[in-house]
Amino acid sequence: MTEATGTPETPQRRVLTQIAPDAWEHAADRAALNALRQVPGFDEAVKRIFGFFGERGIRLLFQANAVRCGPKQFAKLHDMLIEACATMDWPDHPELYVTQTPLVNAGAVGFEHPFIVLNSGAVSLLDDDELHVLIGHELGHVISGHALYRTITILLLELGFQNLPFLAGIALLPIKLALLEWYRKSELSADRAGLLASQDLQASQRVFLKLAGGGDMAQMDLDTFLEQAKEYELSGGPLDTIYKILNTLGASHPFNTLRAAELQRWVDGGAYEKIIGGEYPRRGDVRNERSYSDDVSDAASHYAREARDVAADVVDAAKRAASAFASAFKENREK
């Protein structure tokens, strides 16, 4: 294991030689992607959208109305991308664009040759360390091969199903819901990639804090925000669980408190330290390749675990209601 070189600002960053995306991909990401591929009509929808838009049309849109980063344009962001690629040992440097919009967001888009887009709102909101996290996050999407499905999702959401007549006859609502479910889970994977690329947990968590509350750090506290995240996860019974599901169903991203808690849990579990210490799967190592049956098994266990959690809440609530009813009935008999 060697240290990343090339800039005096990041002497402690470790190069993760030949790291495979399996190292950071969340089990729920794989589970949701497997579920998505099983939706009837999904493969056909992907083929038709890919054939209609193509790689060139999407790239031309940003070449026409965004700024491509390089040595003379947004040079600092360009250098951050080069650093992130070096840290993740990724030889193909995707193009990086900045587009003018106050919406704080970023994306990895494209089909065969993905590129990264940063909204100017994100560039203005985040400091340099946080921007390095964000660029690493989007690079994680690229390395994981997420850009194709993410682009399909964006096109379906932005253009609307009714404006894509060539998809007539395909039941698109199940595809939309399945895509959104996977899209949210893929964010959890990329959050880990952002941490690995930056190797700065504080900056990684500050990104979620700023996405939730804006950029005034004098008015916010990271430790308190993480406590808030725990409170959200532990709150309520079956009714709260239903509200959480309904609130999330149509969203493209997980809630920021959830993302902060999920990333912290990954770090606390020791996975991050193992990777930084050199213990991770390498690209091209057949011993580390996962079979389709492994992914199906993970999908089943992940969703079964979620179902068990919901069921446990419902059963617990039923038990409490039964106990309260029995106590009340007993008291009435004794009167």
Image (cartoon, helix red, strand yellow):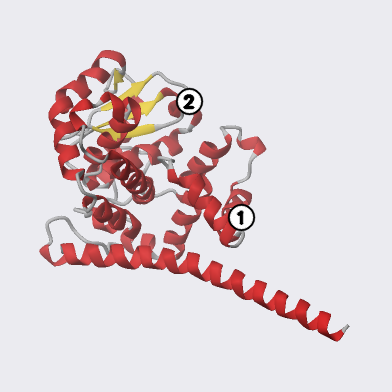
Residue at x 11% of width, y 63% of height: 286
Where's residue 81, x and y in %? 29, 35
Q: Secondary structure at mark 2?
A: helix
Where's residue 124, x and y in %? 48, 25
Q: Is residue 48 left or right of residue 12?
A: left
Quarter of image, res 301: bottom left
The label on residue 38 is none
Quarter of image, res 110: top left
Q: Which residue is mark 1?
A: 227
Residue type highlighted by circle 1: Glu
When the figure is inspected, residue 180 is found, relative to residue 302, above or below; the finding is above
- Binning the other alpha carbons within 10 Å of mark 1 as few (below 14), some (14 to 19) or many (20 upward) gives few
Q: Secondary structure at mark 1?
A: helix
Q: Which residue is mark 2?
A: 124
Q: Earlier in the sequence, mark 2 or mark 1?
A: 2
Q: CA distance from mark 2 to mark 1?
A: 27 Å
Q: Nearer the viewer, residue 91 or 260?
A: 260
Where's residue 234, x and y in %? 58, 61
- Quarter in which the N terminus is drawn: bottom left
Q: Which residue appears farthest toward the top when viewing the image?
A: 64
Q: Is residue 176 left or right of residue 37?
A: right
Quarter of image, res 68: top left
Residue 202 visible? The answer is: no
Of marks 2 and 1, the one in the foreground? 1
When the figure is inspected, residue 82 is found, relative to residue 238, above or below; the finding is above
Contact between labelled residues 1 and 2, with CB atoms less than 8 Å apart: no
